[in-house]
Amino acid sequence: MNHGIVIIGSGFAARQLVKNIRKQDSDVPLTLIAADSMDEYNKPDLSHVISLAQRAEDLTRQTAGEFAEEYRLQLFPDTWITDIDAAAHRVKNHERTWHYDKLVLATGASAAIPPVPGHELMLTLNSQREYQACETTLRDAQRVLIVGAGLIGCELAMDFCRAGKAVTLLDNRASILASLMPPEVSSRLQHRLTGMGVHLLLNAQLQSLTRCSEGIAVALADGRSVRVDAAIAATGLRPETALARRAGLNVARGVVVDRYLQTSDADIYALGDCAEIEGRLLPFLQPIQLSAMVLAKNLLGAAIPLRLPPALIKVKTPDLPLHLAGDTQRDDLSWQIALGPEGMLATGSDESGALRGFVVSEDRMKEAFALLKTLAA
């Protein structure tokens, strides 16, 4: 019997995979199983919901039923898979079992929450469902703490500030976007945020959160404290690997896959935020799109290795947007920074003078694609 392809997950990666499979094969049985409603939404839009006064349902682009009809597949929403029996080629929960010929794990990643006392008071905005659970709180809050000044934290800080809220952005590093670029490059955005009124607490260690009569009392390790109405964790993502681990698959930071997106089991693959591709976690749209294209072909009988060109990463801070690419986090690069009314061009070169990374802002973002072509391999 042809059991076809079973995909666990319904996010961007899973949907891209379905669309690419159907471009090549209209008949192979497809089954999609996920723990959420399976309605389609654009996850990056979560960085702008507050300033746009959007409700969670406003983000829905296509319902699960519409998606199933358009791409001819079986959907099982609000369904938690508890186990994979790789030897028997089946997945199951407490109610039923599904058989597969090929299995794809697109289980995504969950928001990391700092393990401090009172961490349960922190909200996360990693999905439409999470936003729906806290949208009233966030809409009503006047004072908001965002923990983590990385890409998502900076986007949220600007969005909440644009919505008229008093925003405190906290990070234990000395500058914003510290895992992506050096402080001399991120300083333009840092100045813009502070100019808008965002209160930056850098080199600061969160100690605890406590519910109090004035909202939430936020204590720092150096003795300082802040009072806020809502606290949001934006300290990164943790790939969802529990299911893969229980199945005996090779797991490191994510579900380990090779250049063909294949796990340690020949008939199980992983894609998207949960996948660790040859040692790298790549939770960005471009590598996920390319991975979905390659995996669709491989599931249908090809053997095509994934080749990822330098990816363009977008920081969606509307008052000062940034694009970056390459090894911008390396500490051995020599940076040249040109600033002007049209924006910033920052290029990082190695000892040989080869371009290894760049960051562009505002109107100079139109130069990004030309710069991508000149990045050293």
Image (spheres, rainbow, N blue to C red):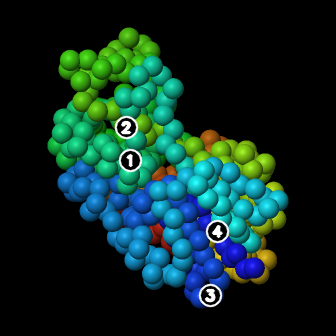
Disc 1 is placed on an element classified as helix
Which residue is drawn at the image coordinates 42% and 60% (left, top)?
A: 37
Q: Residues within 10 Å of mark 1 (few under 14, many from 20)?
A: few
Query: Which badge, 3 or 4, comes first in the chain's sequence?
Result: 4
Horizontal arrangement in the rendering, residue 69 relative to residue 16 (left or right): left
Camera-nearest label, 2 or 4: 4
Q: Crowding at label 2, few (<14), some or many (≥20) Cα neighbours within 10 Å?
A: many
- Disc 1 marks which amino acid? Glu
Say which residue label 3 marks. 27
- The residue wearing badge 4 is 6
> Taking 200 as reference, is 196 above or below it?
below
Q: Residue furthest front?
A: 95
The secondary element bearing badge 3 is classed as loop
User: Disc 1 marks which residue?
Assistant: 130
The numbered mark, 1 or 3, whose residue comes first in the sequence reads 3
Look at label 4 and name its amino acid.
Val
Residue in view at x 18 percent, y 39 percent:
140
Q: Which mark is residue 123?
A: 2
- The one nearer the camera, 69 or 360, is 69
Where in the figure is residue 222, as x and y percent of width and height?
42, 13
Looking at the rendering, which quadrant does residue 168 occupy?
top left
Image location of residue 13, percent across then percent down: 55, 65
Q: CA distance from mark 2 to mark 4?
A: 32 Å
Quadrant location of the N terminus? bottom right
Q: Amino acid at mark 2?
A: Leu
**Circle 4 Cα neighbour tier, 10 Å, few/some/many (<14 / 14–19 / ≥20):** many
Labelled pair 1, 4 in contact (Cβ < 8 Å): no
Question: Element type at marker 2?
Answer: strand
